[in-house]
Amino acid sequence: MSVEAAARTVLSGLDGIRSEVEELYRDLHAHPELGFQEHRTAKKAAEALRSCGYAVTEGIGGTGVTGVLTRGTGPTVLLRADMDALPVREATGLPYASAATARDADGHDRPVMHACGHDVHVACMTGFARLMAAAPRDTWRGTLIVLFQPSEENGDGARAMLDDGLTRKVPRPDVVLAQHVLPYPAGYVGTRPGSFLSAADNLRVTLHGRGAHGSAPQTGVDPVVMAAMCVVRLQTVVSRETGATTPAVVTVGSIQAGTGPNIIPDHAVLQLNVRTYDEDVRRRVLAAIERIVRAEAQASGAPREPEIEHLRSFPPTVNDEGATETVTRAFAGHFGDALHTVELQTASEDLSEIPDAFGVPYTYWGIGGTPPETYAEATRRGTLSEDVPSNHSPRFAPVPQPTLDTGVRALTVGALAWLAAE
């Protein structure tokens, strides 16, 4: 049986579960949970898997869930969906908008929203898992692993599952697959061989000065000025030390210093985010940041060396060429003109830690979630950045259809590219 024939058979059941997938999406959107707090979401995922015959393991790495379904001998395919939401106050105005709050890891109460579409990922994965379980036994052959991952936004969910023995708790896959909803038109599917998502490094820099009265700056060493000079100089890392065809981003996202207008503080704190795609470029950019920060402190006469802390890192997402070609070929037969080559993305994620731990290839693709008419009108007017909310925006909420159908179909066709019975 060809991949497309198998996909038609499996997806013939989509009409029967569409309303349930949509209901789950709206429910998850209204009840988001922060990383490692996804107890409700994980329970719903586990119940859905167990109800259709998967061997389910819960609590991996805290809230991670896996389901395994085997049909004879054949390839083993693992598909991952992330579950966590973000500390964002929703501004969509939807009837199922989130009003949830939660306490974050630092003990602060935060509004919570599915501002990155992980509610789409979970709903699509449960729909796909149900369709694969209900398909005639001669449709596909092998082992299907469905994985729901916590805390992707913090970059530590995949590692937590691995540290908790993931590689011993499920069979070793032959390939790992995943998808992400992006602010492209709903119905859009995009693949990309090689580099897809950037590596990310978060840093905290503490610059030390000497406090003084604002009326007598000559008696102190001003860390605010020092911080300002660092911010300006750091802009040259990309513009003057990185080739024009080499993508990299250096962002200073936070400056904290001082308590009053007439007080020169004794320190200032910068928080930086770095995005790169190449390990050599990453090393050079991080080294340049450290060189500039230390030089500016020395130039200012700082009484102490600055402290440069590496807070969190995400690995790059680099799609395997062969696995991507397999999925792209299957998608082309199913989606036709809706299939595109997705642009290089500067977002980051931790998916790659899972296939790397197993030593297997992976491929990661994108689907659209914006109403097509909204996207087309914004494109015509040249207002995409204003009128099409991006991931992490308080206005980001993928339209249920055709987003959910596309996500279920993409997971199904992608898995069947390996599992379709010959």
Image (cartoon, grey):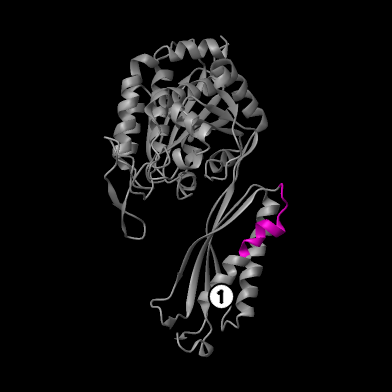
Disc 1 is placed on an element classified as helix
**Percent x, y for residue 132?**
43, 19
Determine the residue positioned at 67% across, 31% down.
Answer: 321
User: Which of the image's four quarters has the N terminus?
Assistant: top right
Report which quarter residue 272 is drawn in. Answer: bottom right
Question: Any magenta on residue 239?
Answer: yes
Q: Is residue 334 left or right of residue 213?
A: right
Determine the residue positioned at 66% across, 56% down.
Answer: 238
Is residue 74 visible in the rendered image? The answer is no
Q: Is residue 202 left or right of residue 37?
A: right
Is residue 168 visible in the rendered image? The answer is yes
User: Which of the image's four quarters has the C terminus?
Assistant: top right
Magenta residues, start to end: 234-245
The front one of 162 and 386 is 386
The front one of 393 and 47 is 393
**Percent x, y for residue 294?**
63, 73
Report which quarter residue 4 is drawn in. Answer: top right
Residue tagged by mark 1?
226
Determine the residue positioned at 53% across, 10% down.
Answer: 5
Determine the residue positioned at 59% across, 26% down.
Answer: 340
Question: Any magenta on residue 399?
Answer: no
Report which quarter residue 346 is drawn in. Answer: top right
**Percent x, y for residue 172?**
54, 32
Question: Around disc 1, counting alpha carbons within 10 Å, would you say few (fewer than 14), some (14 to 19), or many (20 or more)?
Answer: many
Q: Residue furthest front?
A: 381
Callout 1, which amino acid? Met
Q: How many marks?
A: 1
Q: Is residue 10 left or right of residue 41?
A: right
